[in-house]
Image: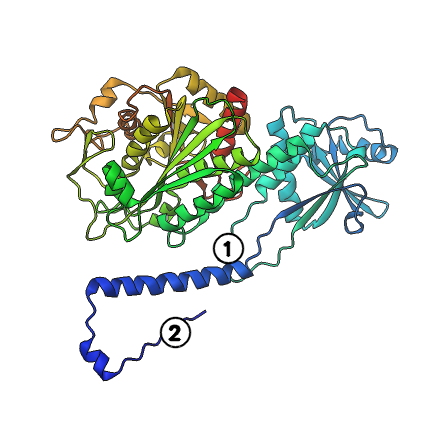
């Protein structure tokens, strides 16, 4: 799509017309935005994501009648025809090792799924994920599961289907040439099957939150800049969330100089957005979740290497997790009070960008010497953490950020780093992570690490110049902004938010890490 803009001026106007460099820049920016909006609208219209369609019906649809999926949780099968087939299934090595076996019998195709090794609900989610991959790779567009021919529990079935849905996510919004992939229709059949039940509603709410997080992280930086991001969060008001946007003028008045310093090199605005959910009628202290939202991180004046800089579109993943979690809590009508706080900035090397050596006064009143502008996320979180503790007086604070590359060196893409001033909170997060396969690993906090962040010129500096323990010294920096000793945990999710390879419950790309973890944390400990 080509947009042509033609401006014709007569001679009289040409003589009088003077355009300053600043006005010319604003005109070009306006044109750029209009073009991008039109392109985005066009792409959205033609885009069609491949997805898994779940249908809950009382009888088998004609399109799916020849493809039945049998979930085998035990060897004793009531249905005589299926029992006859399963005698050879359980002795098949392929079925035992890969958990799937296809068999044709009497002009009908059966897919047997080995559930005998599945002991906990997470096992069923992973198996559901594998089923989706099997159906997709084998082009099984229409199939059904008859609950009458299976011995699984309702919880096992719902978790199995939930796993398949999680795996089916695909972000292809900006592809103009689409692969001819049809949607996969999976029909769940039974005389007593219901379109809705409480567990399914909760899982669907969780799915919505995870997918929103993945969508936000997947968007490119020219589309999801801070101005656009703030507008998208405002749309969550329709789910019953109270959303408040703090713009630059208001943040300046409040004294958010650490956050504003990060974004001052960008033509985009800088914001803090609070998202409140009041599901408990008793005025109990809320749970607080704070997220880093650096929509694109060039490193600023301390410029990053060009190679892989494009991945810095996901440097806002911590904030996306908070936004996705708050949507989930609202959709499932959680019986808690919670607040999400996100700082939204863009770190660019503009003419007005923050310089190495600048000293800023944070919202807490503490001064920070900015030795490296690429250690910017902690500056955003510093102001957000202090404000959250002071304004909302929460019972606990959990912050999430793609904060350091050092945590990837330490833990890879298996665990998020966890630092906390409260052992009970640490254990609760660890246990929740184990349940949903979003694992965390506790790292140390110690005064000797804390000393490394002291500055000769200000109260503190934003990096450790001695070297080593990069993730831990970053956490020590953040702890300085928890003024009133509120139970606090910091999750460095740099290795977890985005994956080049597919995981157990996600395709490659944005993982949505943290939404399931924090949702489970809330369910197990506060509901």
Q: Is residue 69 left or right of residue 26?
A: right
Pick the quarter of the image with the C terminus.
top right
Residue 438 image position (x, y, % from top left): 49, 30
* Side of 466 where 176 appears, left or right: right
- Element under disc 2: loop
In the picture as drawn, the residue positioned furthest to the top comes out as 423
Residue at 27%, 39% in the rendered image:
259
Give how far across and how far down residue 119 sits, in percent. Answer: 65, 23
Label 1 environment density (alpha carbons within 10 Å; few <14, some 14–19, many ≥20) = some
Does residue 492 show up? no
Q: Position of residue 81 (x, y in %)?
A: 86, 36
Q: Residue at x 65, y 52 (%)?
A: 183
Most foreground residue, 493 or 261: 261
Q: Residue at x 34, y 26 (%)?
A: 389
Per the rendering, the mark at residue 440 is none
The residues tagged by marks 1 and 2 sit, at their Cα atoms, a distance apart of: 24 Å
5 in relation to 156, above or below: below
Whether the residues at callouts 1 and 2 have beta carbons within 8 Å, the answer is no
Q: Earlier in the sequence, mark 1 or mark 2?
A: 2
Q: In the rendering, at what x and y percent does residue 161 appear?
A: 65, 37
Q: Which residue is mark 1?
A: 173
Q: Quadrant of residue 7?
A: bottom left
Residue underneath mark 2:
4
Q: Which type of secondary structure does the marked residue at label 1 adopt?
A: loop
Residue 14 in sight in this render: yes
Residue reaching furthest to the bottom: 11
> The N terminus is located in which quarter?
bottom left
Q: Which one is in front, 445 or 78?
A: 445
Q: Residues within 10 Å of mark 2 (few under 14, many from 20)?
A: few
């Amino acid at each position: 799509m080509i947009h042509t803009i033609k401006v014709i001026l007569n001679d009289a106007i040409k003589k009088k017309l003077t355009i300053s460099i600043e006005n010319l820049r604003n005109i070009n920016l306006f044109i750029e935005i209009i073009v991008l909006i039109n392109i985005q609208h066009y792409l959205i219209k033609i885009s069609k994501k491949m997805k898994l369609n779940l249908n809950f019906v009382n009888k088998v649809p004609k399109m799916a009648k020849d493809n039945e999926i049998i979930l085998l949780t035990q060897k004793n099968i009531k249905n005589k025809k299926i029992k006859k087939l399963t005698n050879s299934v359980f002795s098949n090595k392929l079925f035992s090792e890969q958990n799937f076996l296809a068999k044709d019998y009497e002009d009908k195709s059966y897919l047997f799924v080995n559930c005998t090794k599945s002991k906990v609900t997470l096992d069923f989610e992973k198996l559901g994920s594998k089923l989706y991959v099997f159906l997709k790779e084998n082009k099984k567009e229409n199939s059904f599961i008859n609950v009458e021919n299976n011995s699984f529990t309702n919880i096992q079935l719902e978790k199995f289907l939930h796993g398949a849905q999680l795996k089916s996510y695909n972000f292809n919004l900006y592809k103009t040439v689409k692969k001819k992939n049809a949607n996969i229709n999976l029909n769940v059949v039974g005389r007593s099957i219901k379109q809705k039940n409480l567990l399914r509603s909760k899982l669907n709410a969780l799915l919505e939150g995870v997918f929103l997080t993945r969508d936000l992280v997947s968007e490119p930086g020219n589309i999801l800049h801070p101005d656009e991001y703030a507008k998208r969060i405002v749309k969550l008001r329709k789910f019953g969330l109270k959303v408040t946007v703090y713009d630059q003028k208001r943040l300046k008045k409040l004294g958010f100089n650490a956050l504003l310093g990060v974004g001052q090199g960008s033509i985009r605005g800088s914001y803090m957005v609070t998202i409140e959910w009041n599901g408990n009628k008793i005025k109990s202290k809320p749970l607080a979740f704070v997220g880093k939202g650096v929509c694109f991180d060039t490193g600023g004046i301390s410029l990053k290497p060009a190679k892989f800089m494009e991945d810095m579109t996901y440097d806002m993943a911590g904030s996306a997790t908070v936004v996705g979690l708050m949507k989930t809590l609202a959709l499932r009508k959680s019986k808690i009070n919670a607040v999400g706080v996100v700082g939204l900035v863009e770190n660019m090397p503009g003419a007005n960008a923050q310089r190495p050596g600048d000293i800023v006064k944070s919202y807490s009143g503490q001064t920070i010497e900015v030795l490296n502008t690429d250690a910017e996320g902690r500056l955003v979180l510093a102001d957000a953490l202090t404000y959250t503790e002071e304004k909302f007086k929460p019972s606990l604070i959990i912050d999430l950020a793609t904060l350091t590359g050092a945590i990837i060196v330490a833990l890879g893409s298996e665990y998020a780093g966890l630092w906390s001033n409260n052992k009970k909170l640490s254990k609760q997060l660890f246990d929740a992570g184990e349940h949903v396969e979003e694992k965390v690993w506790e790292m140390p906090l110690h005064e000797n690490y804390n000393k490394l962040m002291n500055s000769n010129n200000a109260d503190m500096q934003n990096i450790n110049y001695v070297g080593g323990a990069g993730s831990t010294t970053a956490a020590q920096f953040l702890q300085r902004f928890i003024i009133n000793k509120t139970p606090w945990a910091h999750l460095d999710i740099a290795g977890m938010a985005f994956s080049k390879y597919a995981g157990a419950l996600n395709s490659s790309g944005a993982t949505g890490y943290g939404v399931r973890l924090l949702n489970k944390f809330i369910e197990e400990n506060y509901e």
